[in-house]
Amino acid sequence: MKNLNKKYPILEIKNLYLKYNNKLILNKINLNFFSGEIVTLIGKTNSGKTTFAHAIYNMLPYAGKIIFNKNKIYKLTYDKIFKLGLVYVMQKNRLFEQITVEENLLIGAYLRTNKLLIMRDLNKIYSIFPKLFEQRMQLAINLSNGQKKICSIARALMASPKFIIIDEISFGITNKIINKIIKILIEIQKFGTTIFLIEKNIQLIIPISDHIYIIKKGSIIKSQNYRNN
Ligand SMILES: Nc1ncnc2c1ncn2[C@@H]1O[C@H](COP(=O)(O)OP(=O)(O)OP(=O)(O)O)[C@@H](O)[C@H]1O
């Protein structure tokens, strides 16, 4: 049984509504996320998953309130949200392509001050993903799409986040690599990081999820709790 902090939610979504051109895309979403949970959002194409993540990161205007670690993040820009420890790995690659893989990874840690811990985490990333080590001096633009995704996730992990959103881990990468990423996620979850996965390929994700929500046409239509407590 996992020892999850249920005292107060690390992320609260209150009455979230979002429209594109007058079309309702997210419809009254109310969700609470707690520290150390792995939460998965499942839904078909165009159900509103990515839009939901964009709203959390304040990249789109919405109605409702989103509170992260008691901060009203609906009033903040996404760089400020990052500084609070909420990190978002977008579905599409957002690496800095004209700098090296290692420079990208270190940018993930730019707010951290303990160099020893940063190097420990960097070495850990390299030991889990040896190909990133081999490619560390290459410009990010030269990576394959799958390696770019791994590098994006690794960069987010280098921030030592309190909360990480990953939009489609499985996008462009093999099951073997997904399993490696899952191993790290389980490890950081033990230290209290909340992991929010947005997925279509659910086979590998369901067994590690504490909570699964299903979204359809912008509404959460089902939730399933897999925790033992
Ligand atoms: N920039 C945009 N302008 C207008 N409508 C948009 C825009 N982006 C998304 N939408 C619409 O919002 C709805 C939800 O899209 P969203 O990308 O959130 O779905 P999704 O569940 O993440 O899909 P996928 O699994 O394919 O990534 C869709 O109807 C889509 O057409």
Image (cartoon, rainbow, N blue to C red):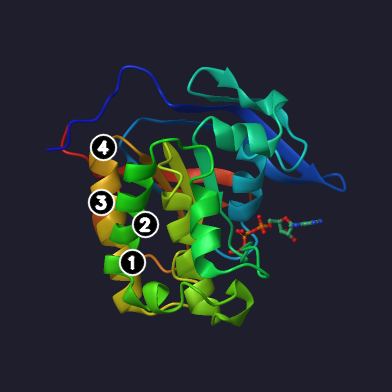
Q: Quadrant of ligand 1?
A: bottom right
| Place of residue 15 in the rendered image (x, y in percent of width and height, measured from the top left) | 62, 27
Determine the residue located farthest toward the front in the rendered image: 115
The answer to which of marks 3 and 2 sits earlier in the sequence is 2
Residue 59's disc number: none
**Disc 4 + disc 2, Cβ < 8 Å:** no
**Which residue is the site of mark 4?**
191
Give the CA distance from mark 4 to mark 2: 17 Å
Q: Note whether 178 is above or below 109 in the view shown.
A: below
Q: Which amino acid type corresponds to the residue marked 1 in the rendered image?
A: Tyr
Quarter location, residue 170: bottom left
Query: CA separation, marks 1 and 3?
Result: 17 Å
What residue sits right under mark 1 in the picture?
126
Q: Nearer the viewer, residue 3 or 180?
A: 180
Task: Choose the circle earlier in sequence order: 4 or 3.
Answer: 3
Q: Residue 101, percent across and down?
A: 52, 68
Whether residue 43 is visible, yes or no, is no
Q: Which residue appears at 41% of the width and 73% of the height?
A: 132
Percent x, y of residue 112: 46, 37
